[in-house]
Each structure stands twice: as C-alpha cells, then as structure tokens.
Image (cartoon, rainbow, N blue to C red):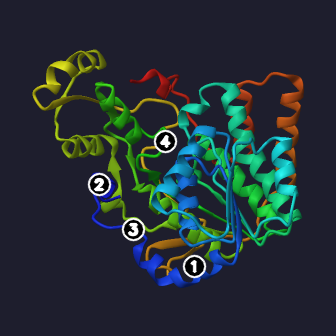
Amino acid sequence: MDSILKIIGREKGLFTPDMEMHEGVLKELVSASSFLVIGGAGSIGQAVVKEIFLRHPKLLHVVDISENNLVELVRDIRSSSGYIEGEFATFAIDVGSDIFDTLINRGQGYDYVLNLSALKHVRSEKDSYTLMRMIDVNIFNTDKTIRQAREKGARKYFCVSTDKAANPVNMMGATKRIMEMFLMRRSLEIPVSTARFANVAFSDGSLLYGFQRRMEKDQPLSAPYDVKRYFITPKESGELCLMSCLLGENRDLFFPKMDEKRDLQTFSELALRYLEYSGYEPYRCESEDEARQKVKELKTKGRWPVYFFESDTTGEKDIEEFYTEKEVLDLERFETIGVIKNEPVYDGERLTYFERQIREMKEKGYWSREELIDLFKVMIPEFQHYETGKFLDGRM
C-alpha cells in the first residue's frame, strides 16, 4: 500500500482516523453477522472481502463470475490472514442466473448483502450490446438482488456507485445514477446505503493497472494530459464500503473528503510518478508510432517512452465530483468521509417506463446506442452526453 500511496501523491491512508475511531463497533458488528459479497473477486470486491474476513464474520460467502479471480482471492487470504472459525466460501456463478437464485434462497439468508458487481469502463458504451449488458449489471441485477435480500430478511443492502454518477456525462455514470433512483424506491422496503468514490489506483482494467502491463510487455505508456481524477487505494475502497455498509443510515451515500487543489491529479502526472518509482526517466514522444518504436532503444539507457495527448473521446469528464449542489451533505459525522443524506425521492412512473422500454427492446431483438442514449436522457434530463465519434479503444 505504501508504494501505491507514493504514486498517487499521499503519505498515509485516507480513512485511517475514522477506521481507528470506529474499529470496535466494526469488529463487533462483523463478528456477529453473516455476509454475502456479490462481485467479490473484482478489485474493490476483493478489498471488501478482506476487510470483512479480518474481523472474523460468522459467515462470509463470495459470488463472482470470474473463477480465476476467486481462486486468487482465496490464495491471497489464506497466505496473508489464514483462517477463521466462521464459514468462508466462494461461488463462481452469475448473479443474473437461476443458480444464484437458488443460492440466495436457501438457508437462513444473510445479515448483510454487499453488491460490488459492475461494468465500470467508459469504453463499454461504444457498442449497443455491451451497453445493454451494463444496464443489466448496474441497474437490473442490483434491483433483483436487493429484492432477494429483502425477501430473505437481510438487515442491510449495500452497493457501490461512482463519482461519475454526479452530473453524469457518460453512460457508465448514468447507469449508476439510475441505479441510485431504483435504490430510493427499494429503500422503503429495506435499509440501503452506498458509496461514491474516486478511481481505485491499480484496480483491474484501470489506466494505472495498464501501466504495469505495458511495462511488463516492454510497451510505452500513454495517457491524456488534461483529464483530472481523484485516486484512492484498493484497501481504502474496501474501508469506505465497509463503513457505509455497517455505519450508514438508510439511503446514506458515503464519499471521501478530498481536496480539489491537493488531490485532483492528471493521468500524465501519475505516469511520470510511476516511472520514477520504477526507476526510469520519461522520454516524451510526439506520436504513438514514435513511442512504440523507441522502447527497446530507451530501456537499456534507463529511460521509457511516454505519449501524452489531449482527451477527445466520448464520455470523458474533465473533472470528477462526488456530489451536486442539490444534494444535502453531512460533513460533521466523520473526519475523512462525507455523507449525502437522501430522502426517498423517486419518480415511480419514470422507473416503470424505463423497465418497460428496456424489456420491449429486448423482446424486439434489436436496439441501438441512440435509442438507449435517448432513454437515458428521459431518465436524467440534465444528462450531458456528447458524442465525439471517438472511443478509448481507438487509443493506445
């Protein structure tokens, strides 16, 4: 974790003061409870599972579609934390399947259900098929599993949102914003809480994770120089989720207190810091072709080619934000965490319309990106989505 902190420009864990202050309560709640973690083999999911495991739950079940990642999760936990008296089991199944339905319906249910499953990439909005799956995973699977949690008597349901849900400009952020609307409807049936947080540094598929893969394969680093983001470590993502799940009140949305001047950073700044940490001096190239061609030549001299460019792809947001001016904040309860206090405000007719439109598209057997974007604009009238005709898959 120390190395990640150095790369993202911090010296200590963000949530350490609040974690230390509430550790007694967290341990007491975890040790007396049973947990189901959906999407528990992803980067954030694994971080959450580890935080729960360390506090010795009565039962901990983890569900994910990635068999390989589940295997690595178990190996990681066994090699670092060992064993607990409570039951710990993983299941490589699809949360949208009838097999999952059988799992969650058997036995006595779970005290806490945490949903970390999500399609998180802006690049996933480039085609209509992946975009529809994003809707299924981020919205409908959430609504399905919260209903199942309620039916089995769960005390609390937690799911992860994103900072991109505040004033969304891309479809990923918009799906999470609509998910939050569905949560408000279900919050009248079961307590729910969620979290919006920054980019998780070196999480699977992230640009920083890509830096690692590029250097392993002797390939150049590439990043936009004008896109600013907040960053937290994987461990911090797990801590924030656990705090929201166990300490959040119904409809609370937790977010990190981060300073715009201190904490917002460009990807190009992180690329330079990552190279310095890796022992290389950056060599700035004028094109992708130049960067690709110079790796072998420069590597032997302790240098590494980088290509920085102006962002021009669809769905990129210049600066991230955790809340809007219309949302009510509690900034006093925690030292390092802010809380959005939501009322159960939602448009039931609009949610029903959304469900019906998606169902009709699927029954028709065809839908276009344009149809989905238009539907999202109905759900979120302030949705600021602009098409540039370019997508991240067209970049190095």
The mark lying in front, picked from 1 and 3, is 1
Q: Are marks 1 and 4 in contact (CB under 8 Å)?
A: no
User: Quarter of the image holding residue 250?
Assistant: bottom right
Residue on which the image places disc 2:
3
Residue 325 visible in this rendered orientation of the protein: no
**Residue at screen point 60% across, 68% down:** 84
**Residue type at tag 4:** Asp
Picture residue at 67% right of the left edge, 76% below the top: 249
Q: Secondary structure at mark 1?
A: helix
Few, some or many C-alpha atoms within 10 Å of disc 3 (few <14, some 14-19, many ≥20)?
many
Q: Is residue 150 left or right of residue 70?
A: right
Q: Nearer the viewer, residue 34 or 118?
A: 34
For mark 4, what is the residue?
Answer: 204
> Which quadrant would residue 263 be assigned to in this image?
bottom left
Q: Quadrant of residue 341?
A: bottom right
Percent x, y for residue 130?
Answer: 66, 29
Q: Vertically, is 156 above or below 368? A: below
Q: Earlier in the sequence, mark 4 or mark 2?
A: 2
Q: Amino acid at mark 2?
A: Ser
Residue drawn 82% across and 64% down?
109
| Amino acid at circle 1 | Lys
Q: Nearer the viewer, residue 15 or 35?
A: 35
- The disc placed on residue 27 is 1
Helix, strand or loop at label 4? It is loop
Residue at the spot of label 3: 14
- Viewer-nearest of discs 3 and 2: 2
Q: Nearer the viewer, residue 286 or 66?
A: 66
